[in-house]
Image (cartoon, rainbow, N blue to C red):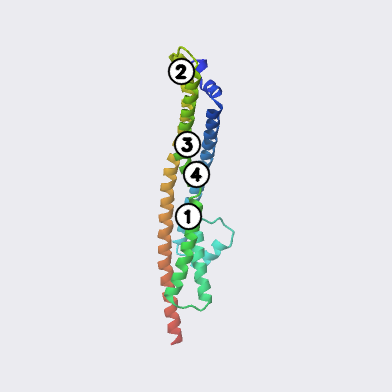
Amino acid sequence: MTQELSITQLILNASWVVQAVMALLVLMSIASWAAIFSKLFALGRVKRLNEAFEREFWSGGNLNQLYEDVTSGKQETGPMERIFASGLREYHKLRERRIADVAALMEGARRAMRASYHREMDTVESSLSFLASVGSVSPYIGLFGTVWGIMHAFTGLASLQQVTLATVAPGIAEALVATAIGLFAAIPAVVAYNRFARDIDRVAIRLETFMEEFSNILQRNISVQVQAGTAANR
């Protein structure tokens, strides 16, 4: 490529509209890469904390002691720990009100865990909509810059009596750079969105499975306590 058709010269010689489109796409690309790395580290942290809590939960320790450790604020907590704490907290509140009905206790604990689950998923899914927007909109923004640049190039050629490929090529090349930058911004965002969506689905399935398993354990404990209380009253 000659000096006249270098990428730098094409950008500098483009119209101000095409340059504005390119600048916007570069900013979108930088923002999307920042969101990609932030989400990558956040999902890795969520996975690490969930796995650590699951190992501790299934180690056979006392649930009340585990609850105190989670709510003490002395350790970093993940989504699974906060869901566990919200369910057991609601259970304790209902028990303090002298509610002994197993169905009422379980319904309250499940509602609390479900509400906490939705809050956690909202946090985990943050930035996904931005990546989806960048992936879907960037090519069209680049295409707009290309169309505008081609229109500008042909308008400038209208005053020429003789038009050759050498006179047409620079203007078209300037316009096509906008499409290239649009694709450069869109492709990583789409790939990252698909990867993160799959990882978040796995996190959601894991959390839902834990809620069901913890509900079963809690229900068994409640039934044992109710039976023990009934036997004591006799």
Given the image, on which type of amino acid does mark 1 rest?
Met
Q: Residues within 10 Å of mark 1 (few under 14, many from 20)?
A: some
Label number found at residue 130:
4
Label number found at residue 121:
1
Upstream in sequence: badge 3 or badge 2: 3
Q: Circle 1 — which element?
A: helix
Task: Name the residue carrying label 2.
Answer: 168
| Residue 49 in sight from this viewpoint | no
Given the image, on which type of amino acid does mark 2 rest?
Val
Question: Which residue is depicted at the point 45% across and 81% down?
Answer: 229
Task: Name the residue carrying label 3.
Answer: 138
- Mark 3–mark 2 Cα distance, whole angstroms, equals 26 Å
* Residue 67 or residue 190, whichever sits in front: 190
- CB under 8 Å between callouts 4 and 2? no
Q: Quadrant of the C terminus?
A: bottom left
Upstream in sequence: badge 4 or badge 2: 4
Upstream in sequence: badge 3 or badge 1: 1
Label 4 or label 3, whichever lies nearer to me, is 3
